[in-house]
Structures are given as C-alpha cells and as structure tokens.
Amino acid sequence: MEIELKYSIPSEKVAEDIWKDKAFFHLEEEGSREEMCFDAKYYDTEDRDLYNNEIAYRVRKEGSSWVASLKWKGHTEGALHVREELNVSVDCDRPAPEVFRGSEIGKHLLEVIGGKPLNCLLETRFHRKRFRIDTGEGLYELSLDDGWILTPFGEERILEAELELFSGETEELEQLGAKMCEKYGLVKEERSKYARGLELINKGV
C-alpha cells in the first residue's frame, strides 16, 4: 500500500529552500539523498476500461531502470493519498500487462483489458530530488518534483512535494506535512499527476 501526502509548491525558490532546510537535515537518513529523472507513460484501452475500473497502469523510467506499476482502490483526504500499489521491474516502456499475471490484481487487469490494445494516454517527465527522514518513530521519504504533465490536449507544470510513509504511523506523517505547509506555504494537492493529466484530456476532448 502507498500512503503519502502531496503538496503544490508555490515557486522554484521555495522548492530549493525545502531541499536545503536545516530543520530536516538532523532527521535525514545518511546516504539517502539523491536526484533522478523520471519519464512515465500511462496506458489504457481506447474505451478507458482501466479508468472505469479505477486502475492506473504506468510504465516509468527511473534513472536507468524501467518499472511497471499498478495503482488501485485509491482514496484521497485533502493532501493524504492512500492506494494499493504493485511494482514490477521491466525492460522498456512497452505495455506488457502480463508481467502482473501472478497477482490477483494482475489477473483482474487482464480480464478488464480483455485483449484490447493499450494506448499511451499521457506522459509525465520530471526531475526528482529526494531523501529519507528517520524520526526514530517512523521512516519517511521527502520528494521534490519539477517537470511537466504532457497530453495531446495540453501540458501542465509539475512543482510539488511528496512525503511518503515507509514505516510508522500516518499521524506522524501528517504532523510532518503540517509543519512543512506552515513554514513554506504549501497547498494541499488532492489530485495525482495522472488525475491532473486526465483532467487536461477531458477538457480537450
């Protein structure tokens, strides 16, 4: 399960200030700080069968590796996003839903697709800076994303912070998020990157 907070960052300067914030440095897990480029493609049938079944299917290049992901049974409360998630390493960005066949959600995915071709609905391309935060009670990852959502009907800027729960309690996750919001004027983001891209497509169709 994926549990994370999403916030819109008001400016590039604020993003850089968060990255350099000394308040987080004393909690930072040593050696966890890194920067990486992400290039993701989201797939569905022409009839939007996956969307209609509340399934998101993504293949993303993370640095030099490719990862296929399914996300489903999601719900959002303000900035808090909770979803089931399954990730599988793959060789390229070509849609290959059969790689999930060994799981229950994978079997359901194949039934929903029903042999129909999968098309790329939208892409996201962004640069991510991230590090892990160890409070002693929980382990979290702070990510700062800067890039674009790309669709045939327009583009939208990505400038956001994600704070993901690795271990610990959701209560502490939300406390950390609240402190970030208060200090940096972050805005709760109720939409995933995928949902934002779908909005662009729906407005253009």
Image: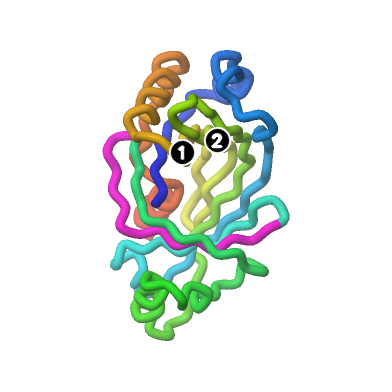
Mark 2 vs mark 1: which is more N-terminal? 2
Q: Which mark is residue 164?
A: 1
The residue positioned 55% from the left and 72% from the top of the image is 95
Q: Nearer the viewer, residue 202 or 109?
A: 109
Q: Secondary structure at mark 1?
A: strand
Q: Nearer the viewer, residue 26 or 34?
A: 26
Q: Is residue 58 left or right of residue 77?
A: right
Bounds of the magenta span? Answer: 65-79
Instruction: Decide if residue 43 is in sight here.
Output: yes
Q: Secondary structure at mark 2?
A: strand
The residue positioned 44% from the left and 62% from the top of the image is 70
Q: Are marks 2 and 1 in contact (CB under 8 Å)?
A: yes
Is residue 84 placed above or below 50 in the rendered structure?
above
Horizontal and vertical percent for residue 160? 50, 34
**Location of mark 2 (residue):** 143
Residue 70 covered by magenta stretch:
yes
Number of marks in picture: 2
Horizontal and vertical percent for residue 6? 42, 36
The residue positioned 43% from the left and 83% from the top of the image is 116
- Label 1: how many residues lie within 10 Å, few (<14), some (14-19) or many (20+)? many
Is residue 67 placed above or below 24 in the rendered structure?
below
Q: Amino acid at mark 1?
A: Glu
Instruction: Decide if residue 204 is in sight here.
Output: no
Q: Nearer the viewer, residue 161 or 49?
A: 161
Residue 42 covered by magenta stretch:
no
- Label 2: how many residues lie within 10 Å, few (<14), some (14-19) or many (20+)? many
Q: Quadrant of residue 180?
A: top left
Q: Amino acid at mark 2?
A: Ser
